[in-house]
Image: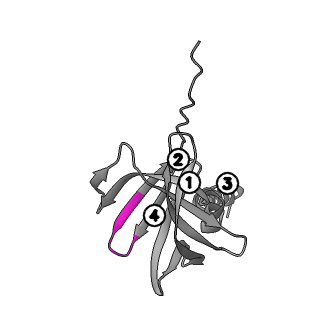
Amino acid sequence: MTFRTVFYIMIITFTFSSCTSNPEDTIEFIEGYWEIKEVKKDNKLIKEYSTSPMVDYFKVNTDLTGFRKKVSPTLNGTFTVNQDKAPLTLKVENDSLNIYYNHNNIITKETIIRATKKELVITNSQGFSYIYKPYKSINIDKQKTP
């Protein structure tokens, strides 16, 4: 093999290996408040949300356990929280990051397709994809009138 051939093989190998993502790298982006943006099935838009009265809060611990909770934002920037939460465990399996929920002794599985600062995409076993955006609070402070 010539130097040029080896060089090209190295470049191609590096290019393809750098394109594959490690599912563990997305874990840091999951925790937080996420607002549903849209739901798709088979790459077809099922529902689009301009606003949502509920926000999903994900808590992820260092041991990859945590919970998912629905919260309702208020106009003063806080949340109304109920006591219902779904315990979860994150697991990397077959190059995917999966979420296992144990809610009322019923275990369900979802797969994280993408998790970044700007988007969270989760699919379930029925083929639905849930696309979230980070929740940005609306804080309407009462202004003093003169």
Graded by Cα atoms within 10 Å as few (under 14), some (14 to 19) or many (20 or more), the crowding at tag 4 reads many
Q: Where does the N terminus fall, quadrant-wise?
A: bottom right
Q: Are marks 1 and 4 in contact (CB under 8 Å)?
A: no
Q: Of all residues shown, which one is farthest toward the front?
A: 146
Find out whether residue 51 is within the magenta segment: no
Q: CA distance from mark 1 to mark 3?
A: 50 Å
The answer to whether 100 appears left or right of 3 in the picture is left
Question: Which badge, 2 or 3, is on the more N-terminal residue?
Answer: 3
Tell me the SS state at disc 1.
strand
Graded by Cα atoms within 10 Å as few (under 14), some (14 to 19) or many (20 or more), the crowding at tag 1 reads many
- Residue 82 spot, x, y in % from top left: 51, 64
Tell me the SS state at disc 2.
loop
Q: CA distance from mark 2 to mark 3?
A: 50 Å
Question: Which badge, 3 or 4, is on the more N-terminal residue?
Answer: 3
Q: CA distance from mark 1 to mark 2?
A: 5 Å
The answer to whether 109 appears left or right of 87 in the picture is left
Foreground disc of the pair 3, 4? 4
Foreground disc of the pair 2, 3? 2
Q: Which residue is mark 4?
A: 122
Q: Which residue is mark 3?
A: 4
| Quadrant assignment, res 28 | bottom right
- Residue 34 spot, x, y in % from top left: 51, 53
Q: Which residue is mark 2?
A: 135
Q: CA distance from mark 3 to mark 4?
A: 43 Å
Q: Residue at x 46, y 59 (%)?
A: 121
Given residues 92 and 6, the one toward you in this image is 92
Q: Of all residues shown, which one is farthest toward the top?
A: 146
Amino acid bearing label 3: Arg
Question: Which badge, 4 or 2, is on the more N-terminal residue?
Answer: 4
Residue 125 higher or lower than 35, as above or below: below
Q: Which residue is mark 1?
A: 33
